[in-house]
Amino acid sequence: MSDYKFFEQVNRAFDKAAAYTKFESGLLEQMKACNDVLHISFPIERDDGSIEVIQGWRVEHSHHKLPTKGGIRYAMEVNEDETMALAALMTYKCAVVNVPFGGAKGGIKIDRNNYSERELERITRRYTFQLMKKNFIGPGTDVPAPDYGTGAREMGWIMDTYRQMSTEIDAEGCVTGKPLSQGGIRGRTEATGRGVFFGVQEACFNKEDMKSIGLDEGVEGKTFVVQGLGNVGYHAAKNMVDAGAIMVGVAEIDGSIYSESGIELDKLMDYKKETGGVSGFEGTQTLKDSSSVLETECDILIPAALENQLNEKNAKRIKAKIIGEAANGPTTSEAHEIIKNRGALIIPDNYLNAGGVTVSYFEWLKNIQHVRFGRMGKRFEEDSYKRILSVIETVSDRKFTDKELKFLAKGGGEAELVDAGLKDTMVNSYNEINELRKIHDVDLRTAAFVNAINKLGEIYEQMGIFP
Ligand code: GLU
């Protein structure tokens, strides 16, 4: 759809929610505006010696908190409007989950499959250099992270480029989602997908809400369809399956598959690695195109690919009772109304996929503190638990087995603390927005925007307009 305007879509949802807040229109306009938009064109040398000009963007949507934060996407669909919309979503998302950053986003318009690893490295390093030149990157200014088409490898290149040219002691905190050996944090790769799961699970734990959409409480036994088995989709699906949900459908670029009795995720991942797609996977029905499976019968639909996937063309045929927006902007405002009016619960992107930036926040804290979480407390905690357990043994005459001791006296290391922090964030934020949903009698997306606008508005009111 060429007339699709993503930034306008985000602002439409914002405006709807703003009606439930008390802020004056000028302040609301300031909240919506993208503060800085950078468009760069830079040359890179291809492996065959030819020169190609690459287009890239970085948008800092809001400076109400610093640094600004948001991923960098490598895709042919990247453009200024998309980057602005995604940067704005980052602002609201961070506010909803109380991550103290402004929103930003970056993108490079390339199909990464057309470039060798060396070429991708040159593109990434040159892009970073351009960001540095314009002061669009730094641990206290703007901190990128992975997004569609990028991962830990690219973040490692960004960090290395930045560090080579900076004398800052906190240089490692200039980007998150890095490899562990370069200042990354345990659990970041899985974080967005795991956060999606925690959010969906929290929604499913609410007996009353489930009853209102004709479902039982809990994730176990529920059927789901996932669109996109990239990093986010895979980890969301894996957590759902581990909790006892049944994956009945998968959509990928090459096509979509369905099986009422369930699809084995890990076998499918092996198959995808081998063949490059999901079509033809044993024991499943291959549907006519990659989006058909979105319209099949299931309890939960998890779009985990790109924006504009549930739109006015297919919304009427979407049957899922819960839509878990793992991607950014998967549902257009028109589709949102159609799906909502049918009685489905839409768990919105501006809350549900915030697990990634939440753990990015932990990574950034680790980098600027220069110490791994748990490094100082873990052993102390374990020794304390052991002392308590030994008193229990003495008074109760019961000896714990080695296995029990190991379990009961476990202290919080980095992985455990990150996971606990992520779960706490997703659970608390869900309940915060669900409460607002009931107070204002709105949907969860509007409630999340109301929540974000209230938090932003309070900050803006207190800080005033400078000068
Ligand atoms: N790209 C991810 C998002 O859209 C993560 C951003 C971050 O970690 O800064 O939320």
Image (tube, rainbow, N blue to C red):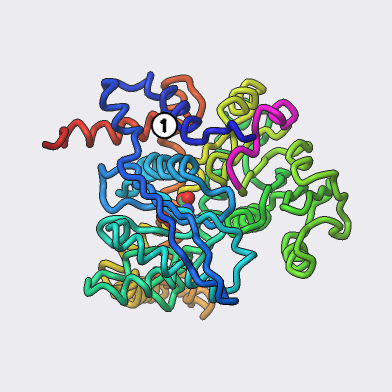
Residue depicted at x 51% and y 41%: 349
- Is 312 magenta? The answer is yes
In the rendered image, the residue lying farthest to the bottom is: 402
In the rendered image, the residue lying farthest to the front is: 50
Q: Main secondary structure of the magenta part?
A: loop
Query: Which of the image's four quarters has the C terminus?
Result: top left
Q: Which residue is mark 1?
A: 449
SS at circle 1: helix
Tell me residue 44's x, y (percent).
Answer: 48, 68
Q: Is residue 356 visible?
A: no
- Is 427 magenta? The answer is no
Tell me residue 75's x, y (percent).
Answer: 57, 54
Q: Is residue 194 above or below residue 376?
A: above
Looking at the rendering, which quadrant does residue 302 occupy? top right
Looking at the rendering, which quadrant does residue 216 occupy? top right
Residue depicted at x 46% and y 24%: 438
Q: Is residue 437 above or below residue 239?
A: above
Badge 1 amino acid:
Phe
